[in-house]
Image (cartoon, grey):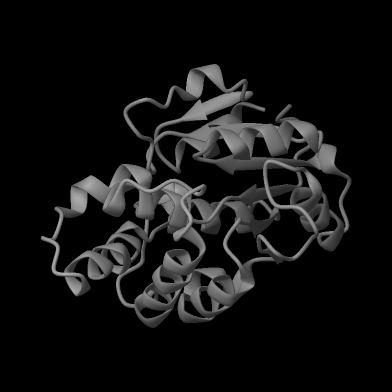
Amino acid sequence: MFHNIRAVLFDLDGTLIDSAPDLGAAADKMRTDRGMPSLPADRYRPMAGAGARGMLGEAFGMTSEHPDYEALREEFFVNYERRMTHLPTVFDGVGQLIEQLLQKQMQWGVVTNKSARFTEPLILAMPLFTTAGAVVSGDTTPHAKPHPAPLLEAAARLELAPEFCIYVGDDERDIIAGLAAGMGTVAATYGYLGAKADPLQWGAHAVINSPTELLQLLGKA
């Protein structure tokens, strides 16, 4: 699956950037605003890959079926929007990985379930993304991951057939979407994997424990 690859597509949070501090702080502010004690940042981190659902679940023990979920989710979004460019950092090795992909004359892009409301300011704020050939948000197409539509949209923007792309992500939904799109898939274990996650069971074509391990896969191919 890694022969004749011309582009690498990445999930965003937990794969390219570490936004857990901002996500956790946005949820924790909701607790302290209500007079509840603050929670340690490491309580939120394993749930960062699940976005608002994970953050509200950790902060309030709330599921998406709760009658107040929609209102609290929007409050969380507002908190996050106000601070999302404060603390995000690129995972170690990502800059080197992107540089090497460009030297290999390979295109790259981002496919995330984040709404464009959040994706676009982040992309503009971080120099890393100036060379991305495609950025597809969770609301760019009618369906978000695990549906393959966002990945197919990214491939189309790069003017490539899906089989010439691989997708790298740190959540099982990423692998499901990549497989459905007909792409090679790589599970990243260095992001926000919770204790119950087992990427070896996701069916990915490969698993990497650091961003630069992807270069080894491509080099072997």
Horizontal and vertical percent position of residue 28: 24, 63
Left or right: 178 in relation to 46? right
Quadrant in the rendering for residue 134:
bottom right
Viewer-proximal residue among 178 and 62: 62
Horizontal and vertical percent position of residue 182: 81, 33
- Left or right of 188 in this view: 194: left
Q: Looking at the image, is 126 positioned above or below residue 210?
A: below
Q: Is residue 118 above or below residue 2?
A: below
Residue 197 percent coordinates (x, y): 42, 27
Tally of numbered discs: 0
Can residue 152 be seen? yes
Measured along the vertical axis of the image, is residue 118 above or below residue 42? below
In the displayed orientation, state which residue is furthest to the top: 201
Q: As rendered, which of 37 and 93 lies closer to the eye?
A: 37
Residue under the point 67% across and 32% down: 176
| The C terminus: image quadrant | top right
Q: Give the camera-side residue of 28 and 86.
A: 28
Toward the left, the furthest residue is: 37
Residue 29 image offset from top left, x and y in percent: 24, 70
Q: Residue furthest front?
A: 67
Rendered residue at 38%/36% (across/down): 193
The residue drawn where x is 81% and y is 53% is 155
Quarter of the N terminus within the rendering: top right
Kindly identify the residue that appears in the image at 81 percent across and 60 percent down. Answer: 158
Q: Is residue 15 visible?
A: no
